[in-house]
Image: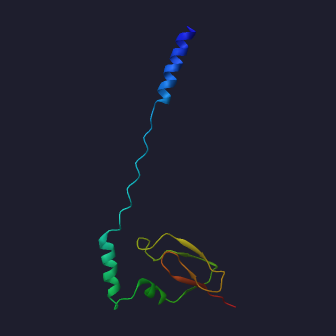
Amino acid sequence: MASSILKLIKSSSSSITSRSFTSVAPSPPPLPPPRFLGEHTAKWMQDTSKKSPMELISEVPPIKVDNRIVACEGDSNPALGHPIEFICLDKPEPAICKYCGLRYVQDHHH
């Protein structure tokens, strides 16, 4: 009985050690960005008669509010806006919304 157990252990251990593992194939390199994005951006940048979005938003004067905290939604219509961002206005310089770039400043009434 002991000899049959030893034979079983030897046969199972030899099958474990004789296994070979294959390495995982490397992932393919990332695809380049679609061509139409680059072409569209280049075409848009060539037209100097139009202002960039950053230029347009910088022309909007800072919005004065009475509270220390303002909730920016980007637009009065929720379908056209962005997620609500609560902005703290404790600093003297205007605070900027990270989504739309609108600037807010606390209007002090002293």
Q: Is 99 above or below relative to 91?
A: above
Residue 95 in the figure: left or right of residue 17: right
Which quarter of the figure has residue 6?
top right
What x and y, as percent, mark residue 72?
Answer: 52, 76
Q: How many marks?
A: 0
User: Residue 74, percent across and down?
Assistant: 47, 76
Looking at the figure, which quarter contains the C terminus? bottom right
The residue depicted at 46 percent of the width and 85 percent of the height is 57
Name the residue furthest top.
Answer: 1
In this view of the protein, which residue sits in the foreground, 87 or 35? 35
On the picture, is 44 further left or further right than 4?
Answer: left
Which image quadrant is residue 109 in? bottom right
Task: Please name whichever residue, 108 or 36, is drawn nearer the observer in this view of the structure.
Answer: 36
Give whichever of 64, 26 is nearer the camera: 26
Q: Kindly identify the residue that appears in the image at 33 percent across and 73 percent down.
A: 37
The chosen color scheme is rainbow
State the image coordinates of residue 82 (x, y, percent, origin top left). 46, 71
Q: Nearer the viewer, residue 62 or 55?
A: 55
Residue located farthest toward the right when viewing the structure as drawn:
110
Whether residue 29 is situated above or below residue 54 in the rendered picture: above
The answer to whether 16 is drawn above or below residue 46 in the figure is above
23 relative position to 68: left or right = left
Question: In the drawing, does residue 66 fall left or right of residue 72?
Answer: right
Quarter of the rendering occupied by the N terminus? top right
